[in-house]
Image (spheres, grey):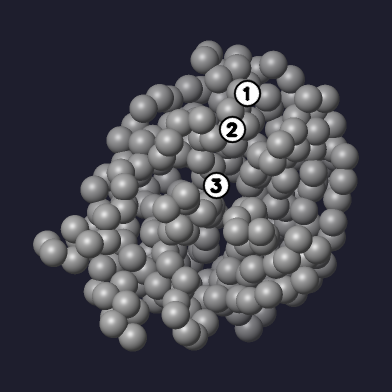
């Protein structure tokens, strides 16, 4: 109980992220991901493989927009990109997971999740499980009877059998309204880092001791406006994000989240 109250009390402004690098990337409309070598800029139906030093396009995959309507984000696992996709703005909302080979830049596998909790916007692999965000919206692209407050984080086993589900706290939802979460990644420190659709903010969340609502630890200013995010696998606490308005990819250093120090302030 004490730990829960402490976490709730710490929904504070954390030290801001510090921009490290910025490069132009025409395909940076939905997200960016690094596998420790090339970078990958994500658009609705395209993925560009980029030189990490210059941003030059090394290769590009382009899919049929009728099949790949809205690729939202990707993560890099070994030599694959695992991408969260949806049929946004169509309703009823439906989602799928798409796999790509990073060497050949080909689409290799698909798993339809169909309709259900919302629109799959991000997916991460953490602690032996898949963690997925199903976004919901107040207006365009939202199912009748739901709004942004129905956004749900779901934990799946390796075989995509559901293991648990949580709602976002009100203090985060009010910052995302009328949209939802566009990006999310687990940190090595055990915190879940989440972005919204347009605010230049990173929300730090924890699992609760009990109940079905995540705990809001704090909020951190970042140089870009929401959208999908990804850790750099080689640089500790370096986070990649995109600036849609300028079609840029940005690397930022994320300060450590020191809960004890924050509590003493």
Q: CA distance from mark 2 to mark 3?
A: 12 Å
The answer to whether residue 251 of the structure is visible from this angle is: yes
Q: Is residue 124 above or below residue 263?
A: above
> Residue drawn at (36%, 36%), measured in percent from left and top?
253
**Nearer to the camera, 164 or 17:** 164
Q: Is residue 241 above or below residue 121?
A: above
Dot 1 alpha-carbon crowd within 10 angstroms: few under 14, some 14 to 19, many 20 or more: some
Question: Circle 1 sits in a helix, a strand or a loop, which is it?
Answer: loop
- Residue placed under numbered mark 2 in the picture: 34
Residue 49, label in figure:
none
Residue 33 location (% of width, % of height): 59, 36
Nearer the camera: disc 2 or disc 3: 2
Left or right: where 36 falls relative to 250? right
Question: Circle 3 sits in a helix, a strand or a loop, which is it?
Answer: loop
Residue 38, label in figure:
1
> Residue drawn at (44%, 80%), measured in percent from left and top?
209
- Residue placed under numbered mark 3 in the picture: 228
Residue 158 location (% of width, % of height): 76, 61
Residue 47 location (% of width, % of height): 71, 33
In which quarter of the view is residue 164 placed?
A: bottom right
């Amino acid at each position: 109980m004490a730990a829960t109250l402490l976490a709730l009390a710490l929904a504070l402004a954390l030290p801001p992220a510090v921009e490290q690098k910025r490069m132009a990337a025409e395909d940076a409309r939905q997200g960016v991901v690094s596998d420790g070598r090339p970078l990958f800029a994500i658009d609705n139906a395209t993925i560009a493989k980029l030189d990490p030093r210059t941003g030059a396009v090394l290769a590009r995959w382009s899919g049929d927009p009728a099949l790949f309507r809205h690729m939202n984000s990707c993560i890099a696992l070994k030599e694959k990109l695992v991408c969260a996709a949806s049929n946004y703005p169509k309703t009823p909302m439906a989602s799928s997971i798409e796999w790509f080979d990073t060497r050949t830049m080909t689409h290799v596998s698909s798993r339809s999740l169909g309709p259900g909790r919302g629109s799959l916007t991000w997916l991460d692999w953490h602690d032996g499980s898949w963690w997925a965000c199903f976004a919901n919206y107040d207006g365009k692209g939202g199912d009748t009877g739901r709004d942004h407050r129905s956004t749900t984080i779901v934990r799946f086993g390796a075989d995509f059998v559901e293991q648990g589900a949580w709602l976002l706290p009100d203090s985060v939802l009010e910052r995302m309204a009328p949209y939802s979460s566009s990006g999310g990644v687990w940190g090595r420190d055990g915190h879940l880092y989440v972005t919204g659709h347009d605010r230049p903010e990173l929300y730090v969340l924890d699992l609760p001791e009990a109940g079905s609502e995540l705990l809001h630890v704090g909020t951190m200013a970042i140089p870009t406006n929401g959208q999908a995010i990804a850790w750099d696998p080689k640089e500790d606490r370096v986070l990649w994000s995109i600036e849609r308005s300028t079609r840029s990819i940005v690397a930022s250093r994320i300060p450590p989240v020191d809960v004890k120090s924050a509590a003493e302030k």
